[in-house]
Image: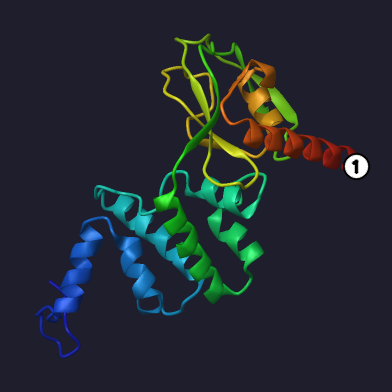
Amino acid sequence: MGSRRDGTNQEPMKTQDQKERDEQIRRGQLLDVLRVRTAMYMGVRKLSALSSFLDGWRFALDVYDIEFIDPLPRDFHDWVAYRLHFHGSTSGYKNMILERVPDENEAVDRFFELLDEYRMRHARVVARLSAVAGREYFLRFKSDGTTTENIPRPLALGTYTLNLIAYTNDPGFFVQFKSDDPTVPPSGRFYPVLRWFERDFGTERDKLEVLDVETFQRWITDDEQYRRALNRKS
């Protein structure tokens, strides 16, 4: 039982609006509440504050062993990298958005725009690769796509079909599939260029069944531009 400022142990009465917001949050709609009341919950309307709030939310639920539903989609970082044209999502959605939109207040607007786009997105299968066996060795890559080491893994448990997915005309794509094979990267991962996909899955682009020739040709062009950019840096 909490204590009020007047020293009594009575909980302060909640307004109907507060009760409705609490119910929204319990239904997993925390971000919808924060969109409308950003500054009220965080003191300021800044993307950095919003990110810290969400980190604190996750931490508190974990400490008190409360069932947790992440308010952000699992691959939201990858989605932001895809839409804002980054070659990886390791820096996180906050840093990527702020690099493109330095104003913290405007960055909040961009965050919710990207979230809305994510919720409304429709997948388009551009190419697929069927009956892919797992690899005996899994390659680990640096952010520039170069290999750092080979990690021994057990052989594949089965085969599966990879779908290379586009949602917009932005560079890059997502790979989706279902498999019990522990030797491959997770489904839903974002790939900025084809060569990263080829290295990760130990395959070649000419083995793909191409369903959308125009988009796939653009991926090949993007891949060649990336290769030339790496050569200029070396």
Give the residue at x 44% y 48%: 121
Task: Locate residue 194, reporting x and y percent.
Answer: 68, 31
> In the figure, 114 relative to 70: above or below?
below
- Quarter of the C terminus within the rendering: top right
Nearer the observer, 120 or 29: 120
Nearer the observer, 168 or 112: 168
Going by the numbered disc 1, the residue's amino acid type is Arg
Query: On the picture, is 234 further left or further right than 87?
Result: right
Residue bearing the label numbered 1: 232
- Quarter of the N terminus within the rendering: bottom left
> In the figure, 231 relative to 182: above or below?
below
Query: On the picture, is 207 further left or further right than 33?
Result: right
Nearer the observer, 27 or 137: 27
Density class for disc 1 (Cα within 10 Å; few <14, some 14-19, many ≥20) is few
Query: On the picture, is 23 further left or further right than 156?
Result: left
Q: Residue furthest bottom?
A: 6
Task: Locate residue 102, reporting x and y percent.
Answer: 64, 70
Q: Evaluate whether residue 182 shows in this view.
A: yes
> In the figure, 43 relative to 134: above or below?
below
Task: Locate residue 159, reporting x and y percent.
Answer: 47, 11
